[in-house]
Image (cartoon, rainbow, N blue to C red):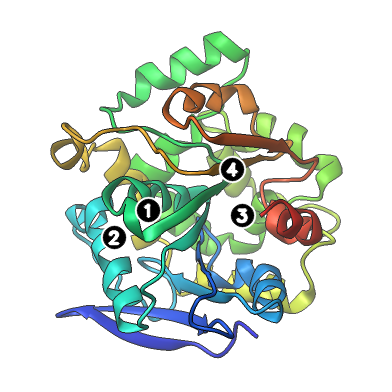
Amino acid sequence: MTSLTQTFVVSPGITYEYVYYPPKTNDTTTHLFLHGFPSSLHSWRHQINHFNRLGYGCLAPNLLDYGKTYSPSDIQEYKAKKMVLHLVALLSHLMIDRSAIVVGHDWGVLPASRFALYEPERVRALILLSIGYLPPGKLDIDETIDTIKQAFGYDALGYWKFLGLDSDAADLIEKNANSFLDLVFPPLDDAVTLWRTNFLPQGKLKEWLLDGRRLPHRASYLSVSDYYVNLGYILEGVKPKLNWYTAYIGNVNEEDEKNLDPNIRLPCLFIADAVSDPVLFASQKQYMPQLTIIEMNTTHWTMEEKPREVNEAI
């Protein structure tokens, strides 16, 4: 179902690729699905099929740098406020006037949560997967890495420095695409150990790629065609996609968000996976008074691995 993409120019020079299946009736809610790195709108295929079959509207755009969507080199273009304006323009174009259920995974959590802050009247509920709400605030990446390591006993954020600041990162990923995808999409049995020893800690992802390491088998939740869809998005170019990390580390949102109310006064759901320690996102409760938390025994790709359970939770 997710192969029938369309494009729309949300503002001069800025095109978004998306799939949209309208609701059966004008008074039915639409779900807005926002993907992360290094996935795409394809990662929501199970949710789109399920909710559209039930009569809901489903809109899943490719975010910046994916497919036919705008792929800028200027990190200022990665401001969350700009992304929200893009999404508002897309919703208006599709005449989606009713408030939407906004669902974000991984980096999709940033525009999803900022959509709820900047445009709360357009959001009926906010659902975050794997990565919890990150409230507005200035990031010191080195201090954050050290704090997390001291608090939890392992380095959970060191890989950001490779993806966001290392000039070799994009080239290494593209030249070792299968090695990268093995580590990013591991089977559940290997996921926690693999990520905490070979992906998350500073320097380990780069070592994995330099060695060209592979896993003996692929994740069962990815079909052969799913795998090649992911591979295609890697081979189309990784460097712009890493600007999401570079921009956030560089605090491009600081000026826009310095006076922004961080509280989200909407029904919220956080679906935690087995790879990321949910304690990392425990503080989000203070900003989301209507928050429900569900933990699922999955890898980072919860909506692909356990679509039935995720759909029921939503």
Alpha carbon separation for disc pair 1 and 3: 25 Å
Circles 2 and 1, Cβ within 8 Å, touching? The answer is yes
User: As rendered, which of 263 and 234 lies closer to the eye?
Assistant: 263
* Circle number at residue 290: none
What residue sits right under mark 1 in the picture? 111
Hey, what amino acid is under mark 1?
A: Pro
Instruction: Give the residue at x 29% y 59%.
Output: 84
Which quadrant: the C terminus? bottom right
Determine the image quadrant of residue 143: top left
Question: According to the image, label 3 marks what residue?
Answer: 180
Location of residue 112 in the rendering, given as x and y in whole percent from the top left corner: 42, 53
Tell me if I can see residue 243 in this picture.
Answer: no
**Residue 249 pos. (x, y %):** 31, 36
Q: Is residue 271 above or below residue 139?
A: below
* Relative to 27, 269 lies left or right: right
Read off the residue under disc 4.
269
Estimate the spatial distance between the alpha carbons at disc 2 and disc 3, rounded to whole Å: 27 Å
Give residue 297's quadrant in the image. Answer: top right
Q: Secondary structure at mark 1?
A: helix
Residue at 53% x, 59% y is: 38
The answer to which of marks 1 and 4 sits earlier in the sequence is 1
Amino acid carrying label 4: it is Leu
Question: Mark 2 — residue?
Answer: 83
**SS for tag 2?**
helix
Q: Position of residue 244 (x, y in %)?
A: 35, 51
Earlier sequence position, callout 2 versus callout 1: 2
What crowding class fits label 2: few (fewer than 14 Cα within 10 Å), some (14-19), or many (20 or more)? some
* Left or right for 101, reference 219: left
The residue depicted at 41 percent of the width and 34 percent of the height is 134
* SS at circle 4: strand
Residue at the farthest top position:
150
The N terminus: image quadrant: bottom right
